[in-house]
Image (spheres, coloured by chain):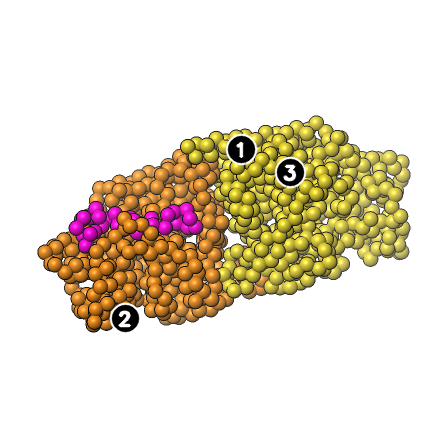
Chain colours: A yellow, B orange
Amino acid sequence: MIFMFQWLLLFLVTLTPTIIGAPNKTPPLSPVNPSLRGHTDVFATSSNDFETFFYNQTLDHFNFKPESYATFQQRYIINSKWWGGASKNAPILVYLGAEGPIDDDVTVLGFLTENAPRFKALVVFLEHRFYGESNPFGLKGGSQSIEAMEESVKNKTIRGYFNSAQALADYAELLLHIKNKLHAHNSPIIVIGGSYGGMLASWFRLKYPHIALGALASSAPILYFDDLTPQDGYYSIVTKDFEEASENCYTTIKQSWNEIDRVASMPNGLAILSQKFNLCSPLNNAMELKNYLDSTYASAAQYNAPPRYPTTRICQGIDAASNDTDILDRVFAGVVAYQPNRPCYNVTPGVTQTSIGWQWQVCSEMVIPIGITSNVSMFPSSPYDAKEYDDDCDKMFGVMPRPHWATTYYGGQDIRMILSKFGSNIIFSNGLRDPYSSGGVLEDISENILAVKTTNGSHCLDILKSVETDPEWLVKQRKDEVKIISRWFRKYYQNLRLLKQ
Amino acid sequence: MIFMFQWLLLFLVTLTPTIIGAPNKTPPLSPVNPSLRGHTDVFATSSNDFETFFYNQTLDHFNFKPESYATFQQRYIINSKWWGGASKNAPILVYLGAEGPIDDDVTVLGFLTENAPRFKALVVFLEHRFYGESNPFGLKGGSQSIEAMEESVKNKTIRGYFNSAQALADYAELLLHIKNKLHAHNSPIIVIGGSYGGMLASWFRLKYPHIALGALASSAPILYFDDLTPQDGYYSIVTKDFEEASENCYTTIKQSWNEIDRVASMPNGLAILSQKFNLCSPLNNAMELKNYLDSTYASAAQYNAPPRYPTTRICQGIDAASNDTDILDRVFAGVVAYQPNRPCYNVTPGVTQTSIGWQWQVCSEMVIPIGITSNVSMFPSSPYDAKEYDDDCDKMFGVMPRPHWATTYYGGQDIRMILSKFGSNIIFSNGLRDPYSSGGVLEDISENILAVKTTNGSHCLDILKSVETDPEWLVKQRKDEVKIISRWFRKYYQNLRLLKQ
């Protein structure tokens, strides 16, 4: 199994010492651990219920040059099995695709199909421009292919159109098209998304309230831009997660970084490390190993889902080896407990469509300043360095990021004061063990902009397919969200009746 | 004095029979009658209080091509004479420039400077991209020059960036820059605009609530897009205005169109008409004269301001000549009463920066479908013809308008239902004698999205400089608006104190 931690991507390419707060180190913003993609059970509902369509989407909504009028094929998938129909103004649940092909989401994002029967809702999945089969550059080698994506982000002109504001405008245009086609003018739309897609969902409700009645924004770190959230937010939660799992585990990991450096500096040190960690190919430097471990822990914390709970798993491995005098053997025991039965371990991340596309997005506008400055972290200090971030992006793409654009366009400053008097119908859901929850909205802002959080939850659990083993708190979180959305619908239909009288 | 009814512009150029619902017939969306620009008294406040600045503005906010990163000089003008300062979080009143150079607005838009002392407010005027000295193409021949504008709209690439979404993003970026520069992070901003600028103001509050606390949108026909407002809206109010001024006047005008056609079809008919109307140059066809009269009446109704009341003036002229048996002599008497003491009358509209720029805007996204279908109008039937509109724009610019974009991006559909549960702090002010009020928001939508209207008002009167002769209802309208804005400020400072505690 190949690792695909995309925030490690291009480490070897850029050849600069990797720091946490670098574009190639922004942790994945996907609802599901990218390294586990493709290993999920096929969704229970037969795929025959889903119909795939393509829409001639406008290339540039915000420009009127001749080339802006070009169109591309945007994919969307509809399931009308449970829909109550346009005549009944039955609702529409829309998943806003994020940084990956939409196929995967249809099978993994259970929230929509599981709640469609209750709401008699149409279920729609929209693919994000440039991913999957919605690449304006054209499609090469199928939905998961990396070829078209690679060419897109290399092309200075094409990739310019690859950004969130254009994606939201796509969704606006496409949803109006779908409503027109179905004569469903009065069917209320709820947009749903997770992680980056969760940000898109909340932003969509804020920017296009005339199209979406409400938004469920799961694990959306909309406050992790500019200086709205302390840079330590992410890794301080990773640290806390491990500390809570086991004090001994936390201490072992904290001590391991110096030990890696010590061994690496010995004669033949890299070979010793490569052997100790059973690596598939020998290390080029100690940083490779440290980055690998860093992202293993971060990913375990972010995707710390029941019933497996990767964080606990790692710590159980480390704790079980506590009689072992060698720190690094103990750390490796944690890795093995998390990912057992491997012939060897691969420290270089795999390349996927998502890793390539997201790299461009974080180097253009999705600048999330994550760093480590504090000593309370179990990680070595690695402060966010805006200049280095810029330089890396400049080297990779020849353009500089626009770090203030997200807060200029989407806001975030004084969010409680601003949104308590503006806007409505957004659920910000978070699991507090998710490192990205540090950049999330964790308190109710108003009667209708609500935070639904779980103490033990991790990244995007609420919108994933429910399973037998789901703990009570997760079942309750989903129920709470359904209750809120039901209330939005109830009020909407009341207003609609009043309006039509 | 040269006439500048820009909606007649290019009539001769396109050589197609002009209909009302054509891009070159969209009535002017300026707070002040463009034909009277430059004739206003110099504003009482010394211009020394105003300081002019330029900001390096991003050319394309929604694209990340290398050329999107280009910048241009955007002009803004600040008056800090009355400002209470950043330390007191004193407010900022911002005029959002519209389709013209900002210089004129500083002298004409009295609302800001007149209310600045009361609010201890900073006064800021922002110039709209491509107008005045804020043309990305570069400046040629000064702020009012038409040369740069002409070249801009001819250039297929440059003009692509010339649209409302980019202009709003300019304002967002620039206002954050100004607040930063002044360390005025907590100073609340109220955006103010009239007509097209009024639309921008309301849209800005909706899209950027984190930057503007509220908006005063004067005479903003935000519902005159797509099929939200019946196409007859505009001309039915023009008709009503004249009918109310004088039944005889209305009837005379209504009968005059056939009479013009009858005379025109006579041998030497155009020469007779040219002489009858004392035209500066002979008519090429009857349509020229009819368009001239059409826009004279429309403009009189739209800018029917006290104390002069052009509509009344025209009707007084017509009524005084009622013993005259010739309909056309009576109509001409109306024109003379409105615009006395001219050596001759010019039916071909003058060309201005505004007329050229606005032509592009209505042919790209500001598609306002005005037409005449009903017999109750005093104008000949001239239904809105989307195809002809498109064809005209295609001929002029080689691109087709995007008629649904305004409602896709800004909304407008079911506005009461949508905004009653979303958004706050917008005043939609209208004068019901203003033909564009037919596309305005005329009823309160919620406790904080309010309609302030006057029965006798016309276009944008409330935000213009107040004068001694202002009638009581106009004085009251302004007072009501100030009261509402004061309430917004009061609540804002209350919240700010709570937040900082």
Q: Is residue A293 magenta?
A: no
Residues at marks 1 and 3, common chain?
yes
Q: With respect to residue B83, does B490 lie above or below?
A: above
Do labels 1 and 3 touch, CB within 8 Å? Answer: no
Instruction: Give the image location of residue B60, x and y in percent.
Output: 52, 59
Q: Which residue is mark 1?
A: A488
Host chain of mark 1: A
Crowding at dot 2, Cα within 10 Å, few <14 / some 14-19 / many 20+, comes out as few
Image quarter of the C terminus of chain A:
top left
Q: Residue at x 74, y 33 (%)?
A: A467
| Among the 4 quarters of the image, the one containing residue A333 | top right
Host chain of mark 3: A
Instruction: Give the image location of residue B270, x and y in percent.
Output: 22, 69
The magenta region covers B223-252
How far apart are the two marked residues, 3 and 2, measured between alpha carbons? 64 Å
Instruction: Give the image location of residue A417, x and y in percent.
Output: 49, 38
Residues at marks 3 and 2, common chain?
no
Amino acid on which the number 2 mark rests in the picture: Asn
Magenta region's main secondary structure? Answer: helix
Local SS, label 1: helix
Local SS, label 3: loop
Do labels 1 and 2 touch, CB within 8 Å? Answer: no
Instruction: Give the image location of residue B271, x and y in percent.
Output: 20, 71
Q: Residue at x 38, y 55 (%)?
A: B384
Amino acid on which the number 1 mark rests in the picture: Trp
Q: Is residue B316 something that shows in the picture?
A: yes
Local SS, label 2: loop
Towards the viewer: A323 or B334: B334
Q: Earlier in the sequence, mark 1 or mark 3?
A: 3
How far apart are the two marked residues, 1 and 3, measured between alpha carbons? 23 Å
Q: Which residue is mark 3?
A: A81
Question: Which mark is drawn over residue B284?
Answer: 2
